[in-house]
Image: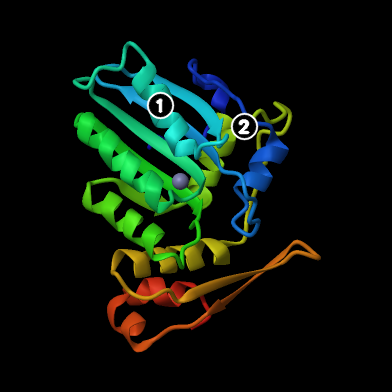
Amino acid sequence: MSSGTGPAVVDPTLRRRIEPQDFEVFFDPRQLRKETCLLYEISWGGRNSVWRHTSQNTNKHVEINFIEKMTSERYFAPSTRCSIIWFLSWSPCGECSKAIIEFLSRHPNVTLFIYVARLYHHMDQRNRQGLRDLINRGVSIQIMTEQEYCYCWRNFVNYAPSNEVYWPRYPNLWMKLYILELHCIILGLPPCLKILRRHQHELTFFTLTLQGCHYQRIPPHILWASGLI
Ligand SMILES: [Zn+2]
């Protein structure tokens, strides 16, 4: 990913497609909004230009919509070399992970980097396995941190030009909790993070239950970063 700072207006290929309030709700790690939003950029091989767009789920998950759009484009041949970066409000489910792997198998010259704001139904073993399969296939999956939120705000959000210094600062704790849980998934450990939603007040709570295997296998700096251990 290129620099996350600097005014977006210097980017001649900029395509801002999402309103500020939508970004703030979709990508808030504490908000469990049902719909998924995808912000993506594509760098075509041999060219410096970056193509940016946004998408949301319809009656299909947003990852499937992306793949169908990509593969229906006449100019996208399997031999085309390109790098794709996704910023997803929810991580891919197990079924989408399978579809992504199939897509990458048919387009071996595509490199995919995925940043996610939240882990989708992370207790579900099919979703956990799907993420592991993606990583084993060479896909990079990371939790969005402040750097990515700032980058997305400046490059995908239709914010007021008079407000260049603002971008949403979500609590770091939630990002660290998801980073911790993603490590559990990658290492094949049982979940340690449980998320609870109080619908009455739109509040999201969590509990952290660590077992011996977590302490033994998760890198200590990831473990302690939550500040709760
Ligand atoms: Zn899905």
Residue depicted at 21% across the width and 36% down the height = 105
Lateral position of residue 200 relative to residue 113, left or right = right
Which sits in the foreground, 49 or 121?
Answer: 121
Which sits in the foreground, 108 or 40?
Answer: 108
Residue 158 lies, in percent from the top left, at 66, 28
Which residue, given by chain and number where applicable, does mark 1 sit on? 68
Q: Quadrant of residue 127?
A: bottom left
Q: Closer to the camera: disc 1 or disc 2? A: 1
Residue depicted at 43% across the width and 23% down the height = 69
Residue 107 lies, in percent from the top left, at 23, 29
How many circles with numbers are drawn on the protein?
Answer: 2
Residue 205 lies, in percent from the top left, at 65, 71
Q: Are marks 1 and 2 in contact (CB under 8 Å)?
A: no
How far, Cα to Cα, is label 1 from label 2? 24 Å
Task: Inspect the image, locate mark 1, and give the three-letter code of the amino acid beneath it.
Answer: Glu
Residue 177 lies, in percent from the top left, at 50, 68
Task: Inspect the image, locate mark 2, and give the three-letter code of the amino acid beneath it.
Answer: Val
Which residue, given by chain and number where applicable, does mark 2 sit on? 157
Residue depicted at 34% across the width and 22% down the height = 71
